Image (cartoon, rainbow, N blue to C red):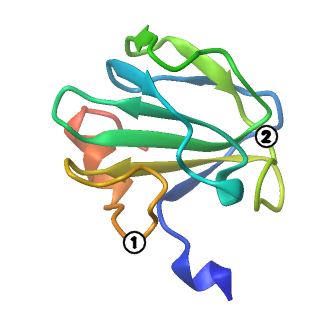
Amino acid sequence: MWARWHTGEDFVAACGTPLYAVASGVVGQSTGGAWAGNHVVIHLANGGSILYAHMTSKSVSPGQIVKPGQLIGYSGETGRAFGCHLHFEYYPQGTTPGDVYSTTDPLVFLRSLGLKP
């Protein structure tokens, strides 16, 4: 039943694939809950946040400033995941990362950065 609330975007990635920040920001506390497993939250200058979920391990810590292209961790299968992949979410200003009812389409966000997911 939880699958009907699946939000964000899943990207196929073998376990241990390096994951990089797509935008500058400050690493926040992990607020995604158990469903996200090991995850990284990055708070952006526009007030929004991004969440990378199901990671095998993280390479950054809360309070750390990251830049686009910086290694933040490795893909995995932690939390509520079935197979290795990256689950990516975008949360607009005023929402709490991990609250799946407030996320918006991350592909729109990625395209706004000039990325072609």
Judging from the image, what secondary structure is the residue with disc 1 in?
A: loop
Quarter of the figure with residue 47: top left
Q: Residue at x 83, y 55 (%)?
A: 83
Mark 2 packing: few (<14 Cα in 10 Å), some, or many (20+)? many
Q: Compare marks 2 and 1 and give the one earlier in the sequence.
A: 2
Residue 63 location, x and y as percent?
44, 15
Q: Is residue 44 above or below residue 107?
A: above
Q: Residue at x 66, y 15 (%)?
A: 59
Q: Residue at x 66, y 22 (%)?
A: 73
Judging from the image, what secondary structure is the residue with disc 2 in?
A: loop
Mark 1 packing: few (<14 Cα in 10 Å), some, or many (20+)? few
Q: Which residue is mark 1?
A: 101
Q: Would residue 115 appear left or right of 6 to someone viewing this image?
A: left
Q: Would residue 43 appear left or right of 63 to someone viewing this image?
A: left
Residue 88 location, x and y as percent?
51, 48
- What amino acid does circle 2 point to? Gly
Q: Residue at x 21, y 51 (%)?
A: 94
Looking at the picture, tell me which residue is in the foreground, 104 or 111. Answer: 104
- What amino acid does circle 1 point to? Tyr
Q: Which residue is mark 2?
A: 76
Q: Quadrant of the C terminus?
A: top left
State the count of labels: 2
Q: Nearer the viewer, mark 2 or mark 1?
A: 1
Quarter of the figure with residue 49: top left
Q: Is residue 117 above or below residue 22?
A: below
Question: In whole angstroms, how far apart are the C-alphas of marks 2 and 1?
Answer: 24 Å
